[in-house]
Image: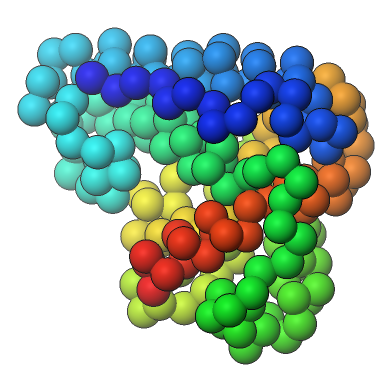
Amino acid sequence: MFELPPLPYAFNALEPAIDAMTMEIHHDKHHGGYVNNLNKALENTPELQNRPVESLLRSINSLPDNVRTAVRNQGGGHANHTFFWEILVPGGSKTPSGSLANALSSSFGTFEDFQKTFSDTAAGRFGSGWAWLVLDDKGKFKVYSTANQDSPYMDGYTPVLGLDVWEHAYYLKYQNRRPEYIKAWWGVVNWDAVAKKYNAAK
Ligand code: MN
């Protein structure tokens, strides 16, 4: 069965970028709900319960019809949020360094060019969804957006950086001002964690 991972910092640790109440509801209620619903959906398919959620998402098209939508939505929600908590840290680490920084520069121009592409993608997602920096199966960077809880693993990609732009991620503090949330969020990105994900995936 799948479990809600504990948040690796306090609810108020990311303030002022992300407020404590948003973090508590987001982690305990939203992420917790995806985990509970995923477990309920897989109650009668024990052979799927022991597979990592990333593996289920990578093979979404070959899953049984009666669980595919639940894995897409609830499993995607579980994977996306687990990833999201891992790439944030109080205070952030400002900018990437090393091989990740070099790879971003050669793919996008300057780091600021990459940030603008990513921010515009996040701001431009209509409705609920995510912005992603991913590696494709050839090890090339791509910035794109997914709707709802659709996961990059479903597209054959490996996520390196992701931003939740569902209203539940920012509405209490930012209301309709999604671009302000995106701007503040850059300040709590854990580039060391992002570099680890990049180095493991490339
Ligand atoms: Mn969320």
Colour mode of the rendering: rainbow
Give the left or right position of residue 95, taking residue 154 as reference. Answer: right
Q: Position of residue 39 (x, y in %)?
A: 29, 16
Q: Quadrant of the N terminus?
A: top left
Near-viewer residue (49 or 82): 82
Q: Residue at x 72, y 51 (%)?
A: 92
Q: Residue at x 37, y 52 (%)?
A: 153
Give the left or right position of residue 186, taking residue 179 as reference. Answer: left
Q: Visible in this render: residue 106?
A: yes
Q: Visible in this render: residue 134?
A: no
Image vertical order of residue 114 relative to residue 67, above or below = below
Near-viewer residue (183 or 56): 183
Q: Position of residue 160 (x, y in %)?
A: 51, 59
Q: Residue at x 76, y 82 (%)?
A: 110
* Residue 26, picture quadrant: top right
Image vertical order of residue 56 relative to residue 170, above or below = below
Image vertical order of residue 109 relative to residue 172, above or below = below
Q: Residue at x 37, y 66 (%)?
A: 201
Q: Position of residue 195 (x, y in %)?
A: 53, 65
